Amino acid sequence: MARHRLPRLLLLPVTLTILILLFLSSSTPPPPPQPPIPCGAAPSDATAGRWVPTPSPPPPPLYTQSCPFHRNAWNCLRNGRPPVAALSWAPSRCGGAVVPRLDPAAFLAAARGRRIGLVGDSLSENLVVALLCALRSGDGGARKWKRRGAWRGGYFPREDVVVAYHRAVLLAKYTWQPVENSKPQSDGIKGTYRVDVDIPADDWANITKFYDVLIFNTGHWWGPDKFPKETPLVFYRGGKPIEPPLGIFDGLKVVLRSMGSYIEREVPSKTLKLWRTQSPRHFDGGEWDHNGSCVSDRLLEENELDSWFDPRFGGVNKEARLVNSAIWEALVGTDIQLLNLTYMSEFRADAHPAIWLGKKDAVAVWGQDCMHWCLPGVPDTWVDILAVRILHYFKQGKG
Ligand SMILES: *[C@@H]1O[C@H](CO)[C@@H](O)[C@H](O)[C@H]1NC(C)=O
Ligand SMILES: *[C@@H]1O[C@H](CO)[C@@H](O)[C@H](O)[C@H]1NC(C)=O
Ligand SMILES: *[C@@H]1O[C@H](CO)[C@@H](O)[C@H](O)[C@H]1NC(C)=O
């Protein structure tokens, strides 16, 4: 009996092994290991964290007031403003570490042969100036590049990289239509801006396949400052006026959805598609044309943010969060990723050009600038976050 039982006992482990092998081969293979997400590259890194003094020794500034890509109105140092405090963004996820400062030469090398495009209003331009000035320190041969309808841009010959900005403040195409002088208007309308919600502005309509990374924004023009009652926006779809006519905020929602689906359709799937959320303004004590001021070197505290920005409190800076909710609604479910820089920027009441605009009378005419940002300044941190996100995308073998 014992002689018979022994082989059967030996068979048991063999059978088990075969069964396990069969089971393993029928289940799907494990996914290849993903590289860990570096600090700054996770979408939540921008939306949860705090500003801390830049760890010492602070890295040397990547550019100065003489950067050839600079724009005078944002060149606060040249315009006499004291330097903005040296602060870094410490995402909650990073265990006390801060988003590292961009390494321009390494970034250019990793982006070799690639093209990065920004499309939108002057807040996209604010970001691109910071990016161009920073990258220039990694390639002294950098030169201006303005092809394919770009408004501003740079070419970095060492690694054959293009970075450019296409100005399209509403993203959709819009055209001025004056009322004829012969017909005096009782309602005081001087003319209208026709917005074709389903047609992208010429400035970027043809570049959807040119870039490897595209970053969009719109939002800062959608208000009565830019389009008052006498020169309103009128929305068209399929060449016909939308009936009943849309108010400006509903028009924004329609344009966001329609440009979002244009981008999904026309931009190749391997292109990294980002949408930058609204940049918060910091007018204190009144609107820009009512002596609103941001001559300040104090950051806002976390518990002050809602009173400044929550639309329920009706403050003068409420538009950022309002526009953001429209952006979120329009883009959820698309392959466009949000680059949510609003929250981290809400703290930075200390970092706008304010009265240091570089032009005599600018403040008397335009009020303080509490909307754009000094450079160097907050957009450098946007650049750091953007860069680490782009590099992570490339490293995953995408784009
Ligand atoms: C951006 O992040 C903030 C902070 O986490 C959040 O409250 C807000 O809803 C986010 N906005 C969008 C459009 O996702
Ligand atoms: C886009 O390119 C096409 C083909 O080259 C051209 O016919 C068209 O005029 C261009 N459109 C714009 C807005 O530049
Ligand atoms: C702005 O301040 C100046 C000087 O204090 C004052 O004369 C002017 O009336 C104020 N303007 C507005 C719109 O409040």
Image (cartoon, grey):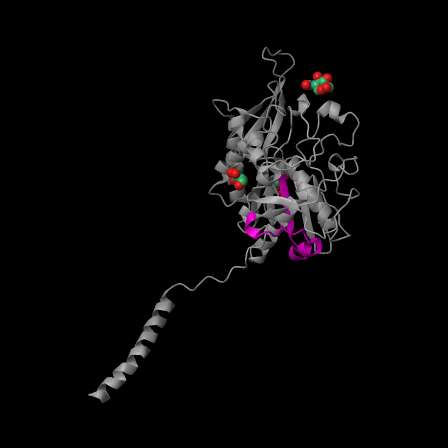
Horizontally, residue 373 falls left or right of residue 48, namely right
Q: What is the total number of numbered labels drawn onto the structure image?
A: 0
> Relative to 392, does residue 203 appear above or below in the rendering?
above
**Residue 74 sits in quarter:** top right
- Magenta span includes 109: yes
Q: Is residue 149 visible?
A: no
Residue 306, picture quadrant? top right
- Of all residues, the one furthest to the left in this rendering is 1
Image quarter where the N terminus lies is bottom left
Please report the bounds of the magenta region as a residue range: 92-119
Q: Nearer the viewer, residue 189 or 223?
A: 223
Q: Is residue 301 left or right of residue 330?
A: right
Q: Could you tell me residue 241's position as x and y percent?
A: 51, 24
Give the x, y percent position of residue 276.
58, 40
Q: Is residue 84 visible?
A: yes
Q: Say which residue appears at 71% left-offset and 48% top-offset.
A: 134
Residue sitting nearer the eye, 283 or 138: 283
Q: Is residue 289 magenta?
A: no
Which image quadrant shows ligand 2? Answer: top right
Q: Is residue 18 above or below residue 178?
A: below
Residue 24: give x, y in percent of width and height.
37, 68
How far across and down, in percent of the image, does residue 156 sit? 72, 51
